[in-house]
Amino acid sequence: MIRSQVYLTEEARKSLQTIAKKTVHTQSDLIREAVDFLIARIQNKQNNKLRQETFGLWEDKIDIRHLRKEFERNF
């Protein structure tokens, strides 16, 4: 792991400290978990956007059904 310094508001620090005391996690664990969650959420949105952009990309380019029938005839 790489050490990183994070600035928090006083309210965020107190809330984080309270949550850490009520759970078995350290403040650092909670921050890492929140960062991991945010990264996964953003990556998921980006992946969904890419899927939406590519949906139907070949629709008007090639008649896939024709190619599939030709392929199946050869076997």
Image (spheres, rainbow, N blue to C red):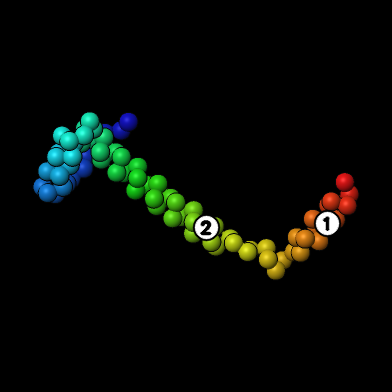
Q: Is residue 43 above or below residue 21?
A: below
Crowd band around label 2 with a 10 angstrom C-alpha radius: few (<14), some (14–19), many (20+): few
The x and y percentages for residue 35 are: 31, 44
Q: Secondary structure at mark 2?
A: helix
The x and y percentages for residue 52 are: 53, 61
| Residue at the image point whose x is 54% and y is 57% from the top | 51
Q: From where the camera sits, is residue 62 visible? A: yes
| Left or right of 5 on screen, residue 74 | right
- What type is the residue that disc 1 sits on? Lys
Quarter containing the N terminus: top left
The earlier-in-sequence mark between 2 and 1 is 2
Q: Which residue is mark 1?
A: 69
Q: Is residue 55 above or below residue 74?
A: below
Q: Nearer the viewer, mark 2 or mark 1?
A: 1
| Residue at the image point whose x is 29% and y is 38% from the top | 32
Q: Which residue is mark 2?
A: 50
Answer with the quarter of the image where residue 66 lies. bottom right
Answer with the quarter of the image where residue 57 lies. bottom right
The x and y percentages for residue 60 are: 70, 69
- What type is the residue that disc 2 sits on? Leu
Q: Secondary structure at mark 1?
A: helix
The furthest residue to the bottom? 60
| Left or right of 24 on screen, residue 55 | right
Which numbered marker is on residue 38?
A: none
| Left or right of 26 on screen, residue 66 | right
In this figure, what is the number of numbered marks? 2
The x and y percentages for residue 37 are: 35, 45
Query: Which one is in front, 60 or 75?
Result: 75
Q: Is residue 63 above or below residue 43?
A: below
Marks 2/1: CA–CA distance:
29 Å
